[in-house]
Image (tube, grey):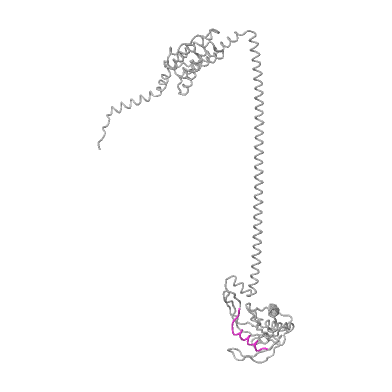
Amino acid sequence: MAMLPLAAPHQWLNRLILLLCLLTLAPAAPACFGQSAYDGQIQAIESMIDQGKFKLARTQSRALTESGRQQRLSNVEAYGNYLYGRALLEDPASSSRDRVAGIESLRLASAGFSDAGMTSTVDSIIAQLRDIVEQEGSTVQGLPLLREFRPSAPAPSPDNSDDVDETALTAIVALQNREIEALNDSQLRQLLRIQQQDLALDSFKYELLNDSLRIVRQEFLLKQQESLTSEERQRRNFFIVLALGILVALALLYLRYRSAQRFQQRIQVAQERSDELLLNILPRKIATELKETGRATARRYDSASVLFSDFVGFSRIASQREPEELVEVLDRTFRAFDEIIERHGLEKIKTIGDAYMCVGGVPEEDPDHAAKTVRAALEIQRYLSEAGDFQARIGIHTGPVVAGVVGQKKFAFDIWGDTVNQAARLEAAGVPGEVTISKATRNLLDSRFECERIGTFEAKNMGLLDRYRVLDSRLIKNPS
């Protein structure tokens, strides 16, 4: 790649000096260029004044002043004010008030020329204002042309601004005195009346202004009260809506609470009904275990008394009665059996046709289960004797059993073992209207029971065993 030649050191120095010069002259350049751009317009306005075209000159000088103000060219703005003052002061048709405005424009122009360093122009304006004071009524002569004094750049005198203000004020007073002296008595009286009318009008305007201020103040207070009332109304409406919302929420919560309470009551009633039905099928202990664990564990009981009951001649009785009547009698009889064994603390196992089986000492162990079972059997026989619907044989045997719940659907509490078989054999070998018991049961009874040996019976896997009938019990009417 070719390398570009580097500039010599003295060339860089010359360029740096040239850049510094440009930066130094830059602030003054806009003013100089701006002024030269407006020289043609300034000369045209002066020409209009010389030709007596004062109205057009005033319009153009106003435009020149506005252009200088927008471009921030103080000397151009000062030229505009100066030419506007000339147009007002040299116009013979100008009123005293217009001449005062012309003097004020000259004063503003002198301030602008002073800031631009054009002291000779300021001095000339002061001299012209002093001439106006000295003449005191003579026509203001033509002011010097601006082209006769261009800016010379010396520093402005610190006293020029005060001199200009003082001379301008004196000239204004002189013009007003001249205008007053030119008036006759009639004109003075008319002027006085006009001033009195102006004063009255000003007083009326002042009162009207006060009334307007009072009305505005009252309207403000009224709007403030309306605002407060509106805020209060909004606040009240908000609290009303909030209260209604709270009431609705409370009502909904109450309805939900009542609904939940009723639902809970229905659940409780259904639960109680379910528990009642479950207790009709299972013993309380087994039902509790089944609800808590989902299953009931089979358990062995070393000593329990099993009661078997069977109606005599049931097939013949069933053939002689209508089915509905037969079921009704059976239901009434078994309900009485249920009440009897419940009073004696026994557990119903099941009914098979006309057979009824229950057990004592299961599932709650009871050392007095044999006596309670025998007393229940005697009460059952007494009930059947009084009711006269059936005759029954009852057999009771005491021994070990296994109790529990089997199956998954339509489960039922049941007992198994040789003791159950021996009780069934004792019932079959018994006599209608009597309670037949085994020797094992007889051995657990005390002297309150009167028993009689009536023979033997065939016990499975055990051979012949003694059997007894219970004659009476002194506690039959008061079971413990």
Residue found 57% across the figure and 71% down from its top: 294
Residue 424 counted in the magenta span: yes
**Quadrant hosting residue 351:** bottom right
Extreme residue in the left direction: 2
- In this view, the residue in front, 314 or 117, is 314
Percent x, y of residue 97? 56, 14
Query: In the image, is residue 252 above or below residue 204?
Result: below
Residue found 66% across the figure and 31% down from its top: 219
Query: In the image, is residue 12 above or below residue 193?
Result: below
Residue found 65% across the figure and 43% down from its top: 235
Per the rendered image, the range of residues in magenta is 414-430
Q: Quadrant of the C terminus?
A: bottom right
Prevailing secondary structure of the magenta residues: helix
Percent x, y of residue 165? 52, 15
- In this view, the residue in front, 209 or 368, is 209
Query: In the image, is residue 383 above or below residue 79?
Result: below
Percent x, y of residue 88? 52, 14
